Every structure is written in structure tokens, then in C-alpha cells.
Amino acid sequence: MKTYINWSGGKDSSLCLYKAKGQGFYPEALLTSVNKIHNRISMHGVRTELLQQQAVSIGLPLHTIELPEQPGMQEYETLMQQKVAELKDIGFTHALFGDIYLEDLKRYREEQLHQQNIECLFPLWKTDTRQLMQEFLAAGFKAIVVCINEKFLNKDFCGRLIDESFVQDLPAGVDVCGENGEYHSFVYDGPVFRQPIAFEKGSIVYRRYDAPKLRNDADGLTSTDAAYGFYFCDLIASHKLQPDM
């Protein structure tokens, strides 16, 4: 079966790729949603140049869903369905996701991709997040926090490396893998990469956004806040990787 992985550039998708191979799935492409206005990974805020370097280091082709600044749900679904249709046309039949606990999100993905007859796979599903973090670190992955939700974490967590001290410092009630959107990360080295991604830390900026909705209120998936703020740590590529010839 021809499989692509929904790639965010962060630790959950990296561990998903790693574990998928151990379960007999061998993705042949990466799919990432990007903000086409700012050329950055959606929500994570990482420059697309670094995303492209991840793809080169992993050795898989990168496909992107080009999104406007804050797309409505209908616009997002239309763009996503168009891209998935393109992937289906070149033979893809399965999609990998790094989701762990969120039932509504899992069901939403399955319903959306069912329209294209794409089967969803969830290698991390229902695994204890502390166990997943231990596996992530033990496997040799290296990651940095690039975005934090101020509702859960203070600014000091933004730009920290993910290691044992980071895990120990997380406040009570914060999921260790950030499964509830507490933080997002960028993985720059590990067993799925041929070579590490070189970068320098830039400035930390604050942004406030309207809370998105997965679907209409009548469907039972609604936001809990009218607006919420994030801190982003900018990462600047310091070396360009070249694809293998």
C-alpha cells in the first residue's frame, strides 16, 4: 500500500514515522499544511526552508497544502481535499497521523479522508504519552519547542530543548507530549534523519488568534475560547542540505 504521512515537523509526526516503519509501514511522501503568506508551517510557525531541509534529510518528497493566513473551515477542507485527490491520483491509498488521544480529531480525519477512499493509520494511538516521550528521547531524537499556548505554559518554555529537564519542569495538568495543544516542536535530529538540521534561534514573538473550530456548533466540535495567544521561537537555517544525487 502506498502511504503518506501528515508531517508537522514536530516530535509526534517524527515518532509516528519512526514507529510506523517498525510496524511495517513505509511512507513514500510527507504532507504538510503551510501558511502561504508567511511561508511557515501552520500553527508551528517554522520556516518552510527548514521544513524542506527535513524532507531532504528524511529522503522523502514533500507535498504542501498552501493555506491563507486564517482559513475558514470550508476553505481548509476544500484545499485539503484537492491535495489529497492529487495524492490519490498518483497511487496513495493510506495516510499516517501522529494523533494520540483526541477522539474528535481522529474521527474528523477519518470522515474527511473516507471521501477520497484513503484509509487512516494511527501508530501512536492510545499510547501513554509519558511512554511516548521516553521512547522519543531514548531513540535519540532532538527537538526544540517552537510554539507555546499561553493558556498552559509561560513564555520561558518557548525555545527550550526537549529533554528530561523539560519534562520535569512541565506544570501539573500539561500533557507531556502537548497533546492538548500546549506546545509544538521542531525536530532537528534523530533516527529518521540522514543528517541533522542546522539552525540558529531567532527572536521570540507573541501572536493572538481567534480560536478555530473543527466543524459547526451543531456537530459538537467547538472552541473553548474566543481568542488565545501563542509565543513563537523563530528558527533560522544556518546550513542548507543538498539532496542525494
Image (spheres, rainbow, N blue to C red):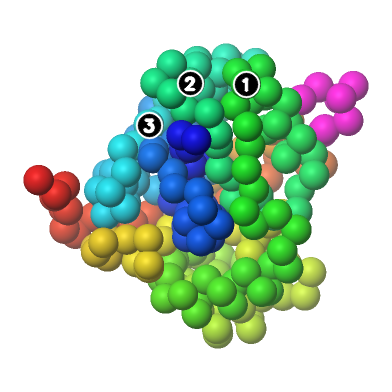
Q: Residues within 10 Å of mark 3 (few under 14, many from 20)?
A: many
Q: Earlier in the sequence, mark 1 or mark 3?
A: 3
Q: CA distance from mark 2 to mark 1?
A: 9 Å
**Between 95 and 93, which is closer to the camera in this rendering?**
93
Compare marks 2 and 1 and give the one earlier in the sequence: 2
Residue sitting at 33 percent across and 56 percent down?
235
Q: Secondary structure at mark 2?
A: helix
Indicate which disc residue 63 carries. 3
- Which of labels 3 and 2 is toward the front? 2
176 versus 184 height, above or below: below
Image vertical order of residue 147 relative to residue 95, above or below = below
Res 117 label: 1
Observer-nearest residue: 220 or 87? Answer: 87
Which label number is shown at residue 88?
Answer: 2
User: As drawn, is 53 to the left or to the right of 209?
Assistant: left
179 on left or right of 199: right
In this picture, is 148 found above or below 105?
A: below
At label 2, counting other C-alpha atoms closer than 10 Å, the crowd grade (few under 14, some 14-19, many 20 or more) is some
Bounds of the magenta segment = 215-223
Contact (Cβ within 8 Å) of mark 2 with mark 1: yes
Q: Are marks 3 and 2 in contact (CB under 8 Å)?
A: no
Residue at position x 42%, y 76% in the image: 140
Label 1: state its secondary structure: loop
Give the image location of residue 115, x and y in percent.
66, 17
At label 3, which amino acid type do we have?
His
Name the side, left or right, on which 67 lies relative to 98. Answer: left
